Amino acid sequence: MSATPPTPARSIAALPGPGGVPYFGNVLQFRPARMHLQLEDWARRYGTPYRLRLIGRDMLVVADSTLIGEALRARPWTFRRARPVQSVFREMGIAGVFSAEGETWERQRRLVMRAFDPAHLKRYFPSLVTVTQRLHRRWQKAAATGAVLDIQAELMRYTVDVTAGLAFGADINTIEGGEDVIQRHLERIFPMVNRRTTAPFAYWRHVKLPADRALERDLAAARRAVEAFIAQARARLAANPALRDNPGNLIEALLAARDAPGSEFSDADVSGNVFTALLAGEDTTANTLAWLCYYLCEVPATLDSLHAETAVVLGTAPQVQAFEQLNALPYTEAATREAMRLRPVAPVLSFEALEDTQLGGFALAAGDIVGALMRLPGMDAGLLDAPETFRPERWLSAEDARLAAAKKALMPFGGGPRFCPGRYLALAEIKMVASMLARNFRIVREPGVVGERYQLSMMPTGLRVRLEARA
Ligand code: HEM
């Protein structure tokens, strides 16, 4: 008896999708800062999966969590990150684990995972307490004067201080007026990375616009800050060679690997990964916190619930003091999950097929691109009631098959072998800040329209708040 022949793969070309222009296809229809909104609009219009035409290749756009998970897990051998990520990061001198591929990625990934594991996080916890205390003091002053705060910028100070502390062993204290050199330069570097990785062609290799010249200055300044972190870590290793076997942070681990006999790591790998930790860890966490603040303003009852939880867990203390308390904040976790569902700061992930393959029954040729819309699975009314509503409580009800499926469909930290290595750190930062905020303050949004801007990660625009101290 003969086996049933496999169903032939369908062609992407047959899928519906927006019309484009000759040669450029749909490429000229993107504006980098709104790219995710445009892709989601098309998903609503054409259904998913749908088809886009890029220069010389097709793109399959998916929003089904099963298909997304399949592609995420097939990296780095069947799919890779879209190619411009690697070339753009490399020429900016910021090549590290995020932009690496194949065996280079495997080597870097092992080191990075060790540096961010929960044991390291626990060791760093006292510094996390100190940085949070500084933010508390800063916000007490702001509340006393009634200052209007750009809350996203406030939170960037926090996350840059934490990343420098945990990953680089440096106390830079931008919260209390330390030099905010890195933060200022990164703020301008983020949108340029986005602009270049999504550009239809690499115009800057032929002609430099004012923005490209400014980028070079920002990169040079940020590089000097990175080199200073590396020099400090080198001095620590020289003073205490035992650190080579038991590095205290990411930068020490990278340097120890760089200096090991027969090492496959270069100086560029060290600085590229230091830069990468800043790029990948700073605005993602700050933006997630900023979106959480937005919803606490929009749905004040959720701030009250958060406050009630912190009153029980923290007692009279103004903030989390013990590592174990981080595991006793289920409402804070649920609110974070809900903010990440409605406003995932990585709303689009893209992959490139490394070989002829299939996804969801569609044939992909090597070089074809898959775009994954990460917000849409969490907006499915079949999985969640009133999916447009911010309702942390939904995650606290007794778990049934539907809730489990909803949890699985959300992938704010990606998935598969390249899932976010900074996840535990990010969640610890978010819980530290959200609980400190809810314990001590009320938060009120200034009138105005809040929008979404995509610049490497998706941030709120127009979000200004005032804090009021609680009695
Ligand atoms: C709420 C905060 C954060 C969110 C939502 C987030 C999200 C993500 C996502 C979606 C990816 C891509 C995963 C994939 O391709 O499957 C990623 C990768 C990455 N993240 Fe995060 N991230 C956050 C915080 C951090 C922090 C704090 C760090 C470190 C300081 C970090 C370091 C990285 C690195 C190095 C990668 C690349 C991993 C690889 O390619 O192997 N992230 N993150």
Image (cartoon, grey):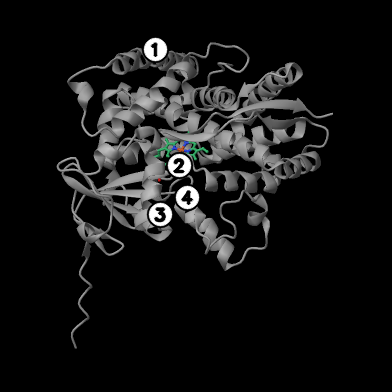
Q: Is residue 86 above or below residue 4?
A: above
Q: Residue at x 29, y 37 (%)?
A: 104
Tell me the distance, in whole angstroms, between the alpha carbons under discs 2 and 3.
28 Å
Q: Nearer the viewer, mark 4 or mark 2?
A: 4
Q: Earlier in the sequence, mark 1 or mark 2?
A: 1
Q: Give whichever of discs 2 and 3 has the lower sequence position.
A: 3
Say if 360 sits above or below 3 in the image. Answer: above
Hey, what amino acid is under mark 3? Arg
Is residue 119 visible in the rendered image? The answer is no
The residue to which callout 2 is attached is 420
Specify the amino acid type for callout 1: Ala
Residue 330, percent across and down?
68, 48
Task: Assign a secondary structure to mark 1.
Answer: helix
> The residue tagged with tag 2: helix, strand or loop?
loop
- Disc ID at residue 221: 1
Measure the alpha-carbon separation of dots 1 and 2: 27 Å
Q: Is residue 241 left or right of residue 388?
A: left
Q: Are marks 3 and 1 in contact (CB under 8 Å)?
A: no
Among the two numbered marks 4 and 2 on one chain, the one whose residue lies closer to the N terminus? 4
Q: CA distance from mark 3 to mark 1?
A: 43 Å
> In this figure, which residue is indicated by the disc labeled 4?
411
Viewer-nearest of labels 3 and 1?
3
Residue at which label 3 appears: 44
Q: Earlier in the sequence, mark 4 or mark 1?
A: 1
